[in-house]
Image (cartoon, grey):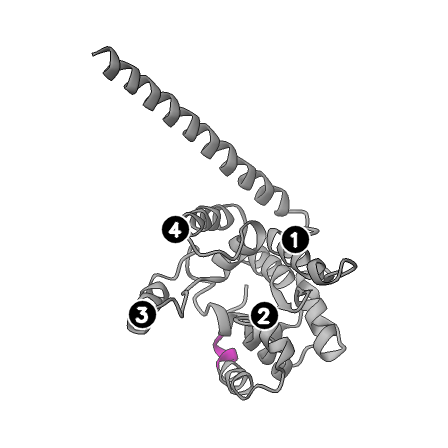
């Protein structure tokens, strides 16, 4: 009985420590999101990871990143991103369950992960705090952060953050840097074709930065362009 009692105490202690650590970690995420409700991030976890990778090849490497306010981003860019990434963005509360189901069915048919079904909010959660690794822990944490983002921020702020921190090429982050990198213009000056092409790059931004003449990229951009009129922008 003593052994059983000792094991029970050890289990309770371990569980208590685990719960405390979990609560502290989630509190850290919560406070950052609360801060970013009014202030803009200078960097993200994903940016820092990419910068370390670039500096392995070039110790002097720097990211191309420049924040731009929501009002100074072309409406065409906003429409293109929603058309490409999350047509239900305005309506859902962080998760597109139909999209997740379609992605699961597609992955099952292919026998490997080829589709994610992630919303803009889920992608923002990953970019702000997490790595690109695929694991059940990472997806679970992503889901919790997604709920926090939807609870603390409005859709306009979520889209503003996403447009400013998402990766758009080799060392290129955010729509302002991407606009200047690919077209020599500001995010405010993007036309519909340019915006659709930038949106089409998002699934594989580094690849398309190096392969800008891709026929698939051109075709996908045309399909996005055709859907942009149906995009609901916050």
Q: CA distance from mark 2 to mark 3?
A: 34 Å
Image position of 15 (left or right of 233)? left
Q: Nearer the viewer, residue 13 or 89?
A: 13
Q: Is residue 71 magenta?
A: no
Q: Residues within 10 Å of mark 2 (few under 14, many from 20)?
A: many
Q: How many marks?
A: 4
The answer to which quarter of the image holds residue 109 is bottom left
Residue position for label 4:
136
Q: Residues within 10 Å of mark 1 (few under 14, many from 20)?
A: few
Q: Residue at left 68%, top 57%?
A: 51
Q: Residue at left 59%, top 42%?
A: 34
Q: Nearer the viewer, residue 108 or 150?
A: 108
User: Magenta residues: mostly which secondary structure?
Assistant: helix
Mark toward the start of the polypeptide (2 vs 3) = 2
Q: What range is drawn magenta here?
A: 227-231
Disc 3, SS: loop
Q: Give the residue furthest to the right.
A: 60
Q: Residues within 10 Å of mark 4 (few under 14, many from 20)?
A: few
Image quarter in which the N terminus is found: top left
Residue 48 numbered mark, or none: 1
Q: Give the residue furthest to the top.
A: 2
Residue 111 numbered mark, or none: 3
Residue position for label 2:
78
Mark toward the start of the polypeptide (3 vs 1) = 1
């Amino acid at each position: 009985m003593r052994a059983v009692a000792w094991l029970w105490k050890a289990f309770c202690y371990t569980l208590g420590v685990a719960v405390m650590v979990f609560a502290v970690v989630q509190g850290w995420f919560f406070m950052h999101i609360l801060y970013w409700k009014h202030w803009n991030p200078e960097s993200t976890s994903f940016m820092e990871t990419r910068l370390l990778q670039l500096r392995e090849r070039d110790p002097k490497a720097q990211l191309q990143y420049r924040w731009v306010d929501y009002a100074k981003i072309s409406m065409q860019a906003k429409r293109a991103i929603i058309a490409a990434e999350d047509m239900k963005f305005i309506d859902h509360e962080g998760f597109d369950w139909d999209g997740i189901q379609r992605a699961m069915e597609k992955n099952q048919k292919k026998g490997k992960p080829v589709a994610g079904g992630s919303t803009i909010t889920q992608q923002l959660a990953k970019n702000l705090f997490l790595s690109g690794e695929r694991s059940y822990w990472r997806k679970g944490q992503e889901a919790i952060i997604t709920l926090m983002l939807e609870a603390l921020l409005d859709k306009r702020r979520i889209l503003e953050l996403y447009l400013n921190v998402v990766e758009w090429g080799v060392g290129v982050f955010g729509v302002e840097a991407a606009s200047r990198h690919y077209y020599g213009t500001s995010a405010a000056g993007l036309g519909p074709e340019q915006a659709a092409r930038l949106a089409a790059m998002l699934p594989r931004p580094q690849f398309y930065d190096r392969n800008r003449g891709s026929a698939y990229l051109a075709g996908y951009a045309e399909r996005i362009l055709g859907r942009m009129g149906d995009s609901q922008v916050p």
